Amino acid sequence: MTKYIIQRIFWLFVVLFVVSFITFSLMHLVPGGPWDREKALDERVVAALNAKYGLDKPFIVQFGNYIAGIFRGDLGVSYSRQDRDVTAILLEGLPKTATLGITAFILAILIGVPLGMAAALKQNSIIDYISVLFATVFASIPGFVLGILLMIIFSVTLHWLPTGGWGSVRQVIMPAFALATLPAAFIARITRASTLEVMRQDYVRTARAMGIKHRVILIRHILRNALIPVITVAGPELAFLVSGSFIIENLFSIPGIGRLFVNGVFARDYGLIMGTILFYAFAVAFINLVVDIMYGVIDPRIRYD
Amino acid sequence: MTVITESVRAHRSLWGDAFIRLRRNRLAITGGVIILLVALTTIIYPFLSKYDFASQDLDSVLTGPSKEHWLGTDELGRDVLTRLIFGARTSLAVGIFTQLIVLGIGLPIGAISGAAGGKIDNFIMRFVDVMYAFPDLLLIILLRAILGGSIYMIFFAIGLVSWVGVARLVRGQTLSLKQRDFVTAARVSGGSGSYVTTRHLIPNSLGPVIVAVTFNIPRAIFAEAALAYIGIGVKPPTPSWGAMIRDGNNVIFAAPHLVLFPAIAIAILMLSFTFLGDGLRDALDPRLRR
């Protein structure tokens, strides 16, 4: 187990290194530079700026400096906002993106698990059909589209909720729901399938034969075992929420990391784009690692060697 | 139902069999029919319509649905229905052409990886792992910034990011097929590596690939809509549903229909492809034969 974790962490570093190399190379292919302004800057100014930020050095040296910086928690300078460095900007956006992502994740579990369980326990009932329909439809409608529909209903028509912004609970409701439905649909689907499977297991029949109360069987035997595959799906879904939220952030004008990224692309802000991609890649890889390790803790049947 | 009285069961090929099963799946057929209708409309409509997607009529701006303009007009007085249909053309083109690129990259790489095995396989699969680590929409945006704004470059950016799934799938298929007797037979009778790969491995792994591609199409459509929505999609005035939503968003209180219609259009087209994909998966998976 320890060996497995060490291997995984080592591999994580390799992947992130290659990801940063590819991103860094791509950044250098983007036409135009960070100093492009509507009014062209004086050549000497550009040269001085390049020298200040080390952009006059060979590519490989620039990359080396960047990697060295990462280990100091320094993701470089933002080219569009000279007063801030990338780390500070990302840390400013992080709480918003994280709050949105985690709220959506909790919502997805709170919607998905009960829906899937109810569908399985009352298989082929009306509840089952509604749940399966929900799972099929919402698994293929992007949160972006749902967000627009929510906005038209609750902001434009009913005037209940603000169309965007950040700072109050009312501004989180719609984006969190828009983000949560897709993973909720997946979680409902998996919960239903795995509950149906567990209900047919011998140990459940044995428990029933022993006269154990229905509710106890439900919680202790069925729920606990049925949730293992759900975690398998929920982990990557959380990672997806982290990276998938950026379009929702733009739709609802939430100043999170995703919106920063889009601003960075328009401003040709190499530093910010690079930092954001690395941040997302790290977050996704880290969540997947944690989930993989958790399987072993939750399900002792899983072995890593 | 007719009762078959012949004692010998008619020969049915894998594909014929799959088609029969697909036909029984009502949702999948609905999806397929909607896709065909949308495709046909995008082809025929330009010949019938008196509007084109770029002509402006500043005397009727932001009007709601009417007899003249079935789905109303936008902030420049352009006919929304016309723009919606031309937007469908953009979406379908993105969906299909990105998948051609995905197949062009994913099929050979997956097949080579699976057929070669050993170090080559290991190297390719590690690279695929790295590609998986990228946040895909962000990478598409970055590639789009590098490649520029023509629609072909958008196909390319989305395709370059989405091939890994197909490569991994084909590799897995190839690995499992390699163990089968008919492949061994072909090899024993002197078939070269490339012969076995192109004649046996690739054709036999096509089923799951078709399913994967069908599921990829709505994702590519969404990616294009997302690009257009944040303002780096196809160049205006070429209509794109994502761009229509972006423009409509500014006047959402005055004219909610401008965002509503393209949003519904995206949802319907994506759902249709997903239903068709679900149906194809059930039809092509021999283990699900009932």
Image (cartoon, rainbow, N blue to C red):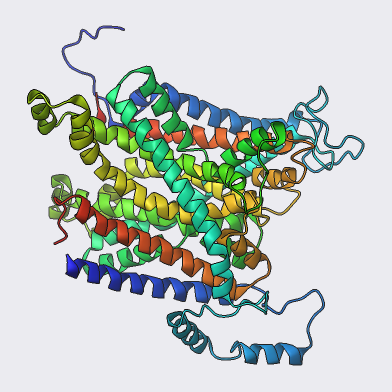
Using the image as rendered, state which of residue A208 and residue A63 is in the foreground. Answer: A208
Using the image as rendered, state which of residue A274 and residue B143 is in the foreground. Answer: A274
- Inspect this view and state whether residue A183 appears: no
The answer to which quarter of the image holds residue A262 is bottom right
What's the residue at 54%, 42% (across, down)?
A178
Q: Is residue A154 left or right of residue A71?
A: right
Give the tally of numbered discs.
Answer: 0
Using the image as rendered, state which of residue A114 and residue B7 is in the foreground. Answer: A114
Residue B110 in percent (x, y) is at 33, 57
Residue B257 in percent (x, y) is at 72, 33
Residue at far right of view: B59
What's the residue at 86%, 37% (across, down)?
B61
Q: Is residue B65 left or right of residue A220?
A: right
Image quarter of the C terminus of chain B: top left
Q: Is residue A226 left or right of residue A145?
A: left
Q: With respect to residue A57, does B229 lie above or below?
A: above
The answer to which quarter of the image holds residue B37 is top right
The answer to which quarter of the image holds residue B19 is top left
Residue A215 in percent (x, y) is at 22, 28
What's the residue at 45%, 42% (across, down)?
A107
Using the image as rendered, state which of residue B208 and residue A160 is in the foreground. Answer: A160
What's the residue at 22%, 63% (across, down)?
B117
- Inspect this view and state whether residue B234 appears: yes
Residue A65 in percent (x, y) is at 49, 87
Image quarter of the N terminus of chain B: top left
Q: With respect to residue A166, does B182 lie above or below?
A: above
